[in-house]
Amino acid sequence: MRTLKFLVISIALLCSVLSQAQTNNVSSEVRKKHFLLNRQGVALDGYDPVSYFSNQPTKGKSEFNTTYKGIIYYFISNENKIKFDKNPDSFEPEYGGWCAYAMGLDGEKVEVDPKRFKIINGKINLFYNGIFGDTLKPWNEKEKEFIPKANANWKNLFQ
């Protein structure tokens, strides 16, 4: 009985690892297709991803840039670029920079106001804030409900 239980747990872990590896091994072209990029092909509309963690999103400079898995990022300084380069996955925006609320609601890719954000579980989450309202407000009301839905919807885009 123990052997069977061990086998089931092992298979479940293997499936989880393979699923994660599949998401992590997405080609640069597929990532570019799904990330929110500006006309110059830069993520976060040129805002420095590291600057979000000091609660002051700031436009980066093109001379301080890096490309990670096909996505270009700008930084305000070489120090911020170095921080990003050491651990890029921790600084990339959730849901490719699209509105977290819309991704959680129905999986739709909705543009954002790059200054309207919230750090959740150590990740940058961005929100639409415009003529149709501020989506951070309804997100905050049902965040625990929206996070798993947004995660599933984002993952489904890559399948």
Image: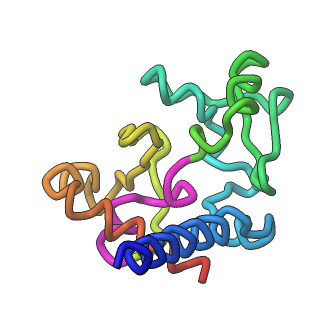
Up-down: is 60 above or below 142?
Answer: above
Up-down: is 147 above or below 50?
Answer: below
Q: Which residues are magenta?
A: 93-106
Up-down: is 21 above or below 122?
Answer: below
Where residue 6 sits in the image (x, y, percent)?
A: 44, 71
Q: Residue at x 66, y 66 (%)?
A: 21
Q: From the image, give the main secondary structure of the stretch colored magenta.
A: helix
Residue 99 among those drawn in magenta? yes
Where residue 66 sits in the image (x, y, percent)?
A: 81, 38
How many numbered discs sit on the rendered protein?
Answer: 0
- Direction from residue 105 to residue 76 in the image, left or right: right
Name the quadrant of the C terminus.
Answer: bottom right
Where residue 63 sits in the image (x, y, percent)?
A: 86, 28
Residue 99, picture quadrant? bottom left
Name the quadrant of the N terminus.
Answer: bottom left
Q: Residue at x 32, y 59 (%)?
A: 131
- Direction from residue 104 to residue 94 in the image, left or right: right
Residue 73, picture quadrant? top right
Up-down: is 27 above or below 58?
Answer: below
Residue 23 among those drawn in magenta? no
